[in-house]
Amino acid sequence: MMLMPAAVLIFIVLGSICVDFAVVFLAQRELSNAAAAAANDAATRALDLDAFYEHGTITLVASEAQRVAGISVASKALDHLSVAPPSVSVGADGEVTVRLTAEVDYIFARAIPGGPKRTSVSATAVATARTG
C-alpha cells in the first residue's frame, strides 16, 4: 500500500513522456507532408516553359522554385510550429529538393527543472519534373 503513490507518480511521468513524444512525432509528420507538397508544387510551377517549348528540355527556375515552395509552406496550417523558411535546391535534371526545419515546444518536459523546452525537427522531400 505504501508503494501505490510511487506507482501513480511513475505512471504520470511515463504518460507525460508519451504525450511529448507524440507531439514531436505529429509535428515531424506535418512538416514532412508540407515539404512533400512544397516540392511537388515547385516541380510543377517552376518549370521553364520557354526552354520546354523551344527545346523540349525540362529545366526549373531556381528563384521561382524558392518562391513557390515558400508560398506552399505558408499556406499550410503550421502556425503552432516555428518553421524556418524552406531551403530549396534545384538539380539540372528537373529535380527539386525542399528541406524544412521547425522548433516544437514540449508540453510536459517544461515542468522538469533544467529540462528541454523545445526540440528541432526536420523533413526533406524531393520531386522530379519529367515528361510522360
Image (cartoon, rainbow, N blue to C red):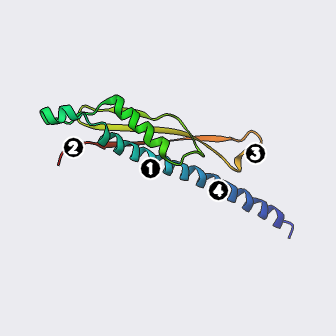
Can see residue 43?
Answer: yes
CA–CA distance in space, label 1 to label 3: 31 Å
Residue placed furthest toward the bottom: 1
Instruction: Give whichever of discs 4 and 3 has the lower sequence position.
Output: 4
Q: In front: mark 1 or mark 3?
A: 1
Instruction: Give whichever of discs 3 and 2 has the lower sequence position.
Output: 3
- CB atoms of marks 4 and 2 within 8 Å: no
At mark 3, the secondary structure is loop
Amino acid type of the residue tagged 2 in the rendering:
Arg
Picture coordinates of residue 38, whole percent (x, y)? 40, 43
Q: Name which quarter of the figure residue 96 lies in.
A: top left
At mark 2, the secondary structure is loop
Q: Label 2 neighbourhood size at 10 Å, few (<14), some (14-19), many (20+)?
A: few
Q: Label 1 neighbourhood size at 10 Å, few (<14), some (14-19), many (20+)?
A: some
Residue placed furthest toward the right: 2
- CB atoms of marks 2 and 1 within 8 Å: no
User: What residue sits 43% from the left and 42% below the top?
Assistant: 72
Instruction: Give whichever of discs 4 and 2 has the lower sequence position.
Output: 4
Amino acid type of the residue tagged 4 in the rendering:
Val
Q: Label 3 neighbourhood size at 10 Å, few (<14), some (14-19), many (20+)?
A: few
The disc at residue 33 is 1
Q: In front: mark 4 or mark 2?
A: 2
User: What residue sits 34% from the left and 42% below the top?
Assistant: 126
Q: In front: mark 4 or mark 3?
A: 4
The disc at residue 112 is 3
Amino acid type of the residue tagged 1 in the rendering:
Asn
For label 2, the residue is: 130
